[in-house]
Image (cartoon, grey):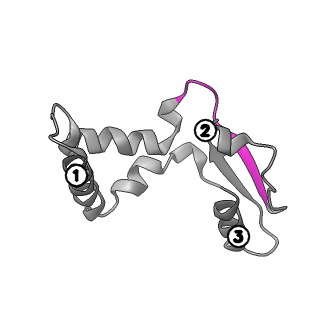
Amino acid sequence: MQIHLNQISEHVQKDYHAIVLMDRAGWHTTEALNVPSNLVLMPLPPYSPELNPVEQVWQQLRKIKLSNIVFKNYNDIVKACCEAWNCFSDEDGNIQNLCTRSWAKI
């Protein structure tokens, strides 16, 4: 998590500040994190998966290829997940559409 925050921080333009939305996973809220001075961590409210873009991505992946399937083994699970992701990510704008909110523009 620390490496991820550092990388985000490096890409924030000088004299700008970034807000990083996070769920409340333990590794997002640990006191061990050294949050760079140009970032602010903003935790999502508890029990609000509709605000977490990755939850919406998972919902789309389930719709595409991952629902109502019994897998033979771990490799079949990985293969199906990769196929679902590739199908989803190959279509221009899918991720941006799921992760963009009209009310969240500056």
Q: Which mark is residue 12?
A: 3
> At which x and y percent is residue 45?
64, 29
Q: Amino acid at mark 1?
A: Asn
Q: Amino acid at mark 2?
A: Asp
> At which x and y percent is residue 31?
81, 44
Quadrant where the C terminus lies? bottom right
Q: Nearer the viewer, mark 3 or mark 1?
A: 1
- Residue at 18 percent of width and 44 percent of height: 65
From the image, tell me which residue sits under label 1.
75
Horizontal relation, residue 51 to residue 62: left or right: right
> At which x and y percent is residue 88?
27, 55
> For the residue carrying disc 2, how many other residues have a C-alpha within 10 Å: few (<14), some (14-19), or many (20+)?
some
Q: Is residue 34 above or below residue 6?
A: above
From the image, tell me which residue sits under label 2.
23
Q: Nearer the viewer, mark 2 or mark 1?
A: 1
| Element type where label 3 sits in the image | loop
